[in-house]
């Protein structure tokens, strides 16, 4: 009920702000919307390991394909495969993983979709020096954000998640 109410208020606020913009007036709740935008923190990482593995596989197939050029058939398929490996590596490198911390939920990208967890669905947050782990309540799954693999800034992430845990009564464990 509360979420539908929030959505209705946001929709009506957006309509009123559009009308006020046409009239040349300031938007309502302008200071509140800036405060809400400040409460959202996004921590971005960088995929390095998997793209390097894909590049190595592409180079390996290129070398193997260039050795076997005596047949003459399948050269186009070999080059197509190598180019596709390189493109996939570039795609995964430039698409940055993230952790978005909002007021009452967390979201990240998993399997090419944005996944989110509400504060009620989080069992605990485990923070160590180079890894931050978020454990689900219902599922046995966990989100792992690593400094080694995905180049996250785990120190600032842990600081913000500790504040998130305090605000939403979630256990934060330091290891």
Image (tube, helix red, strand yellow):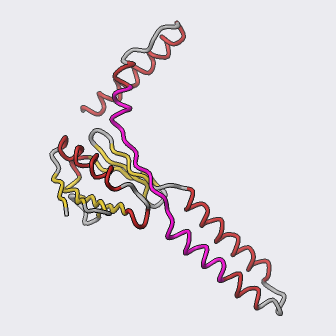
Which of 3/142 is in front?
142
- Left or right position of 64 against 42: right
Dominant SS of magenta comes to helix
Indicate the quadrant where residue 89 lies: bottom right
50 in the magenta segment: yes
Report the quarter where the C terminus lies: bottom left
- Left or right position of 97 against 9: right
Q: Position of residue 76 (x, y in %)?
A: 79, 77
Q: Position of residue 138 (x, y in %)?
A: 22, 59
Q: Position of residue 57 (x, y in %)?
A: 61, 79
Indicate the quadrant where residue 136 lies: bottom left
Residue ID at (36%, 20%): 31
Report the quarter where the N terminus lies: top left
- Left or right position of 86 against 166: right
Number of numbered labels in the structure image: 0
Q: Is residue 84 above or below residue 6?
A: below
Residue ID at (24%, 59%): 127
Residue ID at (15%, 53%): 171
Q: Position of residue 110 (x, y in %)?
A: 42, 59
Which of 124/55 is in front?
55
Q: Which residues are magenta?
A: 34-60
Which of 78/49 is in front?
49
Residue ID at (50%, 55%): 96
Which of 118/126 is in front?
126
Q: Is residue 21 above or below residue 55?
A: above
128 in the magenta segment: no
């Amino acid at each position: 009920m509360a979420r539908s109410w929030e959505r209705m208020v946001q929709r009506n606020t957006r309509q009123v702000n559009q009308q006020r913009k046409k009239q040349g007036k300031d938007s309502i709740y302008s200071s509140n919307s800036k405060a809400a935008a400040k409460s959202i923190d996004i921590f971005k990482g960088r995929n390095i390991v998997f793209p390097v593995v894909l590049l190595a596989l592409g180079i390996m197939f290129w070398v193997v394909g260039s050795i076997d050029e005596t047949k003459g058939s399948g050269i186009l398929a070999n080059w197509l495969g190598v180019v596709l490996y390189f493109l996939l590596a570039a795609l995964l490198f430039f698409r940055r993983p993230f952790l978005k911390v909002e007021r009452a939920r967390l979201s990240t990208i998993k399997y090419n979709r944005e996944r989110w967890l509400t504060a009620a669905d989080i069992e605990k947050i485990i923070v160590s020096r180079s890894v931050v782990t978020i454990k689900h309540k219902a599922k046995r799954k966990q989100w792992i954000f690593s400094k080694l693999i995905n180049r996250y800034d785990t120190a600032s992430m842990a600081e913000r998640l500790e504040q998130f845990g305090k605000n939403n009564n979630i256990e934060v464990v330091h290891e």
